[in-house]
């Protein structure tokens, strides 16, 4: 089938701005203005997206920008080998589960806290998790919810009892919940002061923090030999993607994140810059409110399947993300347990005939529905494109753009019909990608299917990795059949940097990208 | 004058009270729960409840308002939900940057508009006047974000004279390193004001130059420069000064686009982030302070009025 082209109409001020930016971007970014040569440099200027960093400390929920800093300052209990999909030791040297409800974590010996706060011990881990539980922090819901009790066994061992068997313990609890704080520093400084300038055990420590700039300095006591290679990393939050790119081309930055995908083609022509564009652990998806709208036409499975069939995912990847995205029809991205392929059932260019057959066979007709999305520019454009696609089978999407506060207000309170949104995955386990969205008890779910609940709860409680993997295949297959959510693409994570930089290791999860391996060649 | 000043000062708390009530009402009427935004989608009801309690969001709205107002009266503007920092601390970081940028933009606007306005008035209906009019039309017409992009393209990318970012960076050492990042944003922000001021001063000067006392001054044989600068300009500046004061307050309020493009950590960016994240204390605290600036700017304008024109009495 030939690739279809969809056009949205109307010129907005934001569109005009983007157009201007793109024009000037194209005029400047492909030129040979050479960024500074890196010989002899030991510092790195990084421009990241957003207006500020938000919180940096693992005791308070952080935004992505704050998370990027937090993962330079803190080491996790574990990290991920993205090639082999394995959870590998970091501060936790080893872990076992002698019975389904017990996890014993052996901490690495000889790791020091920054700025003279002593050695990292089992007590620090116990203190961290107990603090989250006592303060009912955000981590209870995301990662620590299965924990029943925590105790230390000697200086380096922590024993955790869980309320239920939890197969995702290494990935979710130790992974996402595994940034350990210094009990001594946190107690002495107090939560607010510690949160403002946290003491970690990672490769870099905070030297200064001013406005939208954070300077990280090498941790002289870091436990991993020959790391970090840089003396300083200076992060600045720059909200406009064109400004970030232009400042990089001019040499004000050495490394930037999140350029506008539309400009990446021009950037690739600049031989002084390197573009790193890799599939990210995030999706764009459609969601149906199947719980709150019992009489809606989309309760008919055939209509939802027809919508999924009519979506030209490759067109979304090309027209919205300029090729910097991977079409997908399922909830488990590459690198996760349970991943089989990006496209398992629905063709990348869609199948209108199949969609129409499904509707006719079920004796249904199209319908009109309000679809909400947040005010991210690319989502608005994507929804316009998707509206054009579904119009081919008689379905009319009335688009409602909201800022993220307004969107969440409707979405989390299930006061909507259909939604289109994107999300970044925070924990390296399929439990995090599906349970919250598809289990009837999940806070983000608008779906109630006992068969799905049983599968999700079963996979969550299963400790055998091979069995869990099979269960996640079943969950994905059921999702593809039932279509409570329709997945479109996994957008790439894009960074651009000076060609003289070496050692950067891209990951599908930007939170955990450390700069400790980066140096000037 | 003193009586007038006293009356105006007495009115300030009342105006600020109305502002506080309005902004509190607007923030609470806006759909969106800050706790939901903060904690995200994968969270527990316990965490949501604990946070609501921590920030008094579980209390009735009048109680929330009274608690907040009580803190404000004791000099505490509250604590940011999202950043977990005192609002006063955020203000101390961002307001000086915004004030510096507004001052730089105002300096640029005055440096350009005063000579242009005078020139246009003195050379009325000549090609110089038409050129000035053309400039002011362009100044009104071009959006500041578009101008910012053009300035970046010409002066940063092509000529490599000026930096794009860097305001507020601790990496800037020396006067030029600290001053240079302000130039392009100040020009982008101040260009609209140059157009406003030039038109205003031109009209005002033309009025004044047609007055009888100017003809008398000329007839007395005073030097043309003295007539223009001492007798005409001083009187023409009266409506101009009011506009300058009002526009200065306005400049702090409209910086957000310029802050966005040049990555300036000022008041506009802080408020924008706060609005998006429903960070009520930041929105409320910043609005109150910016409203205070507007009030002060207007008061200063009124006082300058009297100083410039002895006929004006309060």
Image: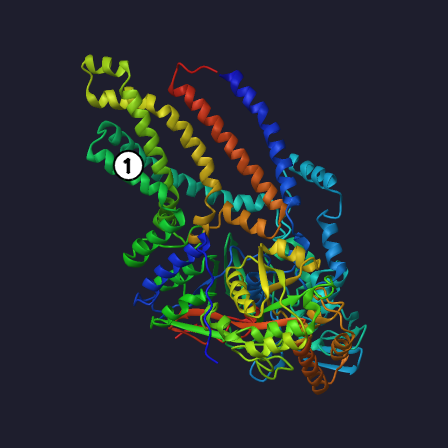
Q: In x, y percent, where is residue A236?
A: 47, 58
Q: In x, y percent, where is residue B124?
A: 23, 29
Quarter of the image with the C terminus of chain A is bottom left
Q: Which residue is most to the bottom?
A: A466
Tell me which corner region of the image, top left, top right, bottom left or bottom right, holds residue A195: bottom right
Q: Subunit of mark 1?
A: B
Asked whether residue A59 is in view, the answer is no
> How many dots with numbers?
1
Q: Is residue A240 above or below residue A496?
A: above
Query: Residue A337 or A61: which is nearer the viewer?
Result: A337
Q: Is residue B180 above or below residue A92?
A: above
Q: In x, y percent, where is residue A486?
A: 62, 72
Q: In x, y percent, where is residue A57?
A: 62, 60
Q: Which residue is mark 1?
A: B133
Q: Is residue A473 left or right of residue A63?
A: right
Determine crowd level at label 1: few under 14, some 14-19, many 20+ residues with C-alpha closer than 10 A.
some
Tell me which corner region of the image, top left, top right, bottom left or bottom right, holds residue B207: top left
Q: Is residue A348 left or right of residue B134?
A: right
């Amino acid at each position: 089938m030939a690739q279809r082209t969809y056009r949205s109409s109307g010129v907005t001020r934001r569109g005009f701005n983007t157009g201007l930016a793109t024009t000037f971007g194209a005029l400047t970014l492909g030129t040979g203005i050479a960024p500074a040569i890196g010989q002899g440099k030991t510092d790195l200027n990084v421009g990241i997206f957003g207006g500020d960093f938000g919180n940096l400390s693992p005791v308070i929920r952080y935004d992505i920008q704050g998370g990027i800093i937090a993962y330079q300052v803190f080491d996790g209990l574990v990290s991920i080998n993205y090639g082999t999909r394995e959870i590998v030791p970091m501060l936790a040297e080893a872990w076992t589960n002698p019975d389904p409800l017990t996890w014993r974590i052996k901490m690495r010996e000889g790791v020091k806290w920054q700025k003279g706060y002593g050695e990292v011990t089992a007590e620090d881990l116990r203190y961290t998790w107990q603090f989250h539980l006592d303060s009912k922090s955000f981590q209870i819901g995301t990662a620590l919810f299965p924990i029943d009790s925590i105790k230390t066994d000697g200086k380096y061992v922590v024993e955790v009892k869980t309320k239920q068997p939890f197969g995702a313990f290494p990935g979710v609890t130790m992974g996402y919940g595994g940034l350990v704080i210094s009990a001594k520093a946190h107690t002495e400084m107090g939560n607010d002061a510690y949160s403002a300038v946290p003491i970690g055990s990672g490769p870099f420590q905070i030297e200064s923090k001013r406005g939208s700039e954070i300077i990280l300095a090498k941790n002289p006591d870091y436990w991993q030999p020959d790391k970090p290679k840089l003396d300083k990393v200076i992060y600045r939050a720059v909200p406009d993607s064109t400004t970030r790119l232009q400042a990089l081309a001019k040499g004000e930055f050495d490394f930037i994140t999140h350029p506008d995908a539309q400009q990446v083609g021009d950037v690739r022509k600049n031989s002084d810059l390197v573009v790193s564009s890799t599939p990210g652990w995030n999706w764009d998806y459609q969601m149906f409110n199947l719980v709150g709208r019992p009489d809606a036409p989309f309760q008919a499975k055939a209509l939802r399947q027809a919508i999924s069939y009519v979506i030209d995912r490759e067109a979304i990847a090309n027209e919205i993300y300029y090729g910097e995205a991977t079409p997908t029809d399922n909830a488990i991205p590459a690198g996760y347990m349970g991943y089989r392929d990006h496209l398992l059932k629905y063709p990348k260019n869609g199948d209108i005939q199949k969609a129409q057959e499904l509707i006719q066979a079920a004796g249904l007709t199209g319908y009109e529905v309000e679809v909400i999305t947040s005010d991210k520019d690319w989502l608005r454009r994507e929804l316009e494109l998707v509206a054009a696609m579904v119009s081919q089978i008689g379905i009319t999407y009335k688009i409602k753009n909201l800022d993220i506060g307004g969107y969440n207000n409707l979405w989390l309170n299930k006061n909507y019909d259909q939604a289109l949104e994107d999300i970044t995955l925070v924990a390296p386990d399929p439990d995090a990608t599906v349970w919250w969205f598809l289990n009837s008890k999940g806070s983000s779910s608008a779906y109630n299917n006992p068969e799905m609940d049983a599968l999700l709860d079963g996979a969550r409680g299963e400790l055998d990795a091979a069995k869990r993997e099979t269960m996640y295949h079943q969950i994905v297959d059921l999702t593809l059949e039932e279509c409570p959510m329709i997945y479109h693409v996994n957008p790439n994570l894009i960074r651009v940097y000076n060609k003289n930089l070496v050692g950067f290791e891209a990951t599908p999860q930007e939170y955990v990208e450390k700069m400790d391996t980066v140096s000037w060649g | 004058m003193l009586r007038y000043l006293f009356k105006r000062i007495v009115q300030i708390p009342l105006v600020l009270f109305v502002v506080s009530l309005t902004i509190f009402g607007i923030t609470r009427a806006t759909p969106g729960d800050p706790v939901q935004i903060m904690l995200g989608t994968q969270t527990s009801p316990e965490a949501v409840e604990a946070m609501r309690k921590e920030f008094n969001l579980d209390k009735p709205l009048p109680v929330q308002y009274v608690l907040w107002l009580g803190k404000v009266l004791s000099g505490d503007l509250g604590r940011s939900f999202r950043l977990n920092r005192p609002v006063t601390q955020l203000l101390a970081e961002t307001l000086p940057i915004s004030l510096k940028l507004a001052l730089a933009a105002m300096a640029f606007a005055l440096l350009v508009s005063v000579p242009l306005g005078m020139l246009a008035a003195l050379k009325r209906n000549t090609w110089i006047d038409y050129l000035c009019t053309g400039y002011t039309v362009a100044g009104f017409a071009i959006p500041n974000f578009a101008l910012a992009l053009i300035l970046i393209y010409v002066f940063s990318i092509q000529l490599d004279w000026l930096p794009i970012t860097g305001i507020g960076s601790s990496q800037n050492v020396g006067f030029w390193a600290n001053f240079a990042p302000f130039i392009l944003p100040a020009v982008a922000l101040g260009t609209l004001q140059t157009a406003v001021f030039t038109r205003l001063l031109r009209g005002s000067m033309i009025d004044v130059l047609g007055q009888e006392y100017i003809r008398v001054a000329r007839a007395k044989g005073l030097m043309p420069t003295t007539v223009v600068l001492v007798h005409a300009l001083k009187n023409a500046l009266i409506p101009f000064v009011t506009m300058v004061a009002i526009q200065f307050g306005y400049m702090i309020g409209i910086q957000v686009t310029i802050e966005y493009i040049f990555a300036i950590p000022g008041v506009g960016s802080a408020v924008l982030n706060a609005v998006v994240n429903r960070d009520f204390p930041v929105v409320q605290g910043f609005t109150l302070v910016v409203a205070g600036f507007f009030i002060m700017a207007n008061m200063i304008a009124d006082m300058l009025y009297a100083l410039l024109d002895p006929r004006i009495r309060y």
